[in-house]
Structure formats: C-alpha cells, structure tokens
Amino acid sequence: MSFFSSQPLGLRTTTPLTDKEFEELRSFIYQLAGIDVPKQRKYLLENRLRSRIIELKLKSFSEYYQYLRHGADRKQEIEVFCEKMTTNETSFFRDQKQLDVFRDSILMPTLDEQKNSGRKSLNIWSAGCSSGEEPYTLSMMLHEILKLGIIGWKIRITANDISSAMIEKAKQGLYNDYSLRNTPKDIIARYFTKEPGGYRIHPKVQKNVNFQKINLNDTAALKTIPRSQIVFCRNVIIYFDLAMKKKVINAFYDNLQPGGYLILGHSESLHSITNIFQPVRKPGGMVYQRME
Ligand SMILES: C[S@@+](CC[C@H](N)C(=O)[O-])C[C@H]1O[C@@H](n2cnc3c(N)ncnc32)[C@H](O)[C@@H]1O
C-alpha cells in the first residue's frame, strides 16, 4: 500500500466519522451504485469501513475518501468499498411461500403461454442476484416443472450483481449449509453433490444461468440484457433512494416483454414509486405486470 504509506499511525478505533466525512462517503456510494445511506445509519457506514481503513493504515475517513478518488489502486479499492457497502444476505428458496405462488400463478402459466405460441423459450432476469442462490433456485424450479422436457426448451436466466466477489462465488457454485437453510432435503439430494468444501450445484442447473457483473446504476449496461418474460428483483431496491428506484424500475419495464412480470421481495412494493406497471394481487402478495 503506497498512497499514504508515510503516515506513521493508522486510524484509531475511537476516531469518529465526522458529518463532513459521512457526507463525502455517502455521496460517493450513491454516485456509484445508487445506494442511499440515510443519516440515521451513519453508524453502519462507520462500522463497515473502519476495519478497512485500519487495514490500509490510513489515518482518517477523509484520507480513505481521497484514496478512493485518487489512490493508485482506486479501481480495486472501489470494488472493496462497494462490497463493504452492500448487503448480500440471501439463500436458496428464500421466501418459499412467495416462490410457491410465483410457480403456480406466474411461472407455469408463462411456460404454457410460450409453448402455446410456439416459442419454447423463457428469459428471466435476476437483478441483484448476490452469490447466485436466487437464479439457481429459479433454474431448479424450472427443472422440477419441466423435468426431462427441459431439454426441448431454451431457458436463459441472466443474473447480475454489482459485486465481483459475489459473481465469482456464484460462478463457482459451491455453497455451505447456511445457504441451503431453506432448501428442501429432496431438492438438495437432486441438485447438489456433497464435497469436502460444501455442496456443489449440479452443472445442469448452472447451464441455464448466465452471470455478469452489472451495476443497476449503469443504464447503458442494463440495455444489453436480453428481453425477459420475468424480472426478479427481490430485496435490492430497498437500498436505493426514490430517484434510483424509479430509474431501475423503468429499466425493468423496458426489459420486459409486454405481459411480462416484475417480482419484488415479498414485503416490497411499487406504491409511491411509479404506476407504469399494473399491480396484480396474488395470494402471497403483489406482483407487477407490464401491459401491452
Ligand atoms: C440483499 S441481496 C438480495 C439477493 C437476492 N435478490 C435475494 O433476495 O436473496 C442485495 C444484492 O443487491 C446487490 N446490489 C446493490 N446495489 C446494486 C447495484 N447498484 N447494482 C447491482 N447490484 C446491486 C448487492 O450487491 C446484493 O448482492
């Protein structure tokens, strides 16, 4: 580490984050990823960055800010910063009840519709996929529904996240018990192989999923994602402010084929964000449909 290597003493565990420093770092993550850190969560930013600043032997939060902006390793450090500032909590079969309703009232009818119109193809976009559990869950659900018939289908699940580390983990496809805490035993038996390092996802589940590092704040990059029948974006927009929420929801709208569905987390809604989508009430909550 060379940028501030002349500094003899690093940040102390007691050095506070000043309001000015908070504003600088808060604005930096917002510009970068659209992530909004409200004032009342100042402690969170402070806690997440302190150990990193100590590790880099920098003296203060403002030196860290300067390092992010001008340091020789700023590109790599921005990756680390992003990882510190995001919440990657996820699991396979997260919110099983919501997924059951999704399977019965959206996924199966969409597959029927595609088949009946002579297109045995389905595109799903998992936006903010963390370490891959969500898109792999969708792939396993499709295997469960279509069984061997999946061979005749062109299924493409495009999964992305801002974090390179999460995308790498997703591509590796090796998971621990914690990731599988909500997964039925028979599904584990069918789609995972136990290895000394954890549970390896079956290649046939991986085959349908294409991972890419993409920032949802990058409108041009979002335009490269294939048009979808279904967009999944669960537990992601809660971290964005209103302007960023509107921006990504518009991108989902543009991506969806007419009649396609947007699925948010079970406690999330588009209420007071936008009315471009038609809300459709389902037993497990609301889903959003792009009309013609
Ligand atoms: C809490 S996880 C949700 C994972 C999964 N969708 C689920 O519900 O289990 C939120 C994810 O959104 C990602 N994320 C946050 N801001 C992002 C952005 N601007 N672009 C892409 N991904 C982002 C984070 O890196 C994190 O992995």
Image (cartoon, rainbow, N blue to C red):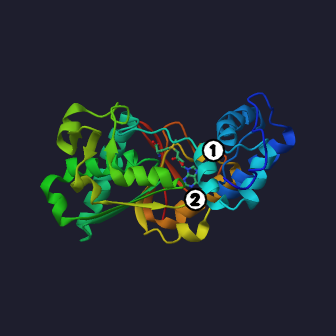
Q: Ligand 1: does it lie within 8 Å of the C-beta at label 2?
A: yes
Q: Position of residue 32 (x, y in %)?
A: 67, 57
Q: Is residue 79 visible?
A: yes
* Relative vertical location of residue 193 with respect to residue 163 in this rendering, above or below: above
Q: Residues within 10 Å of mark 1 (few under 14, many from 20)?
A: some
Name the foreground residue: 256 vs 187.
187
* Relative vertical location of residue 51 with respect to residue 141 in this rendering, above or below: above
Q: CA distance from mark 2 to mark 1?
A: 15 Å
Given this view, does label 2 or label 1 mark the residue nearer the observer?
1
User: Pointer 2: what residue?
Assistant: 216
Give amino acid for label 2: Leu
* Relative vertical location of residue 28 with respect to residue 87 in this rendering, above or below: below
Label 1 element class? helix
Name the foreground residue: 89 vs 107.
89
| Left or right of 149, for residue 65 | right
User: Pointer 1: what residue?
Assistant: 85
Name the residue at the top extreme: 14
Name the foreground residue: 46 vs 104.
46
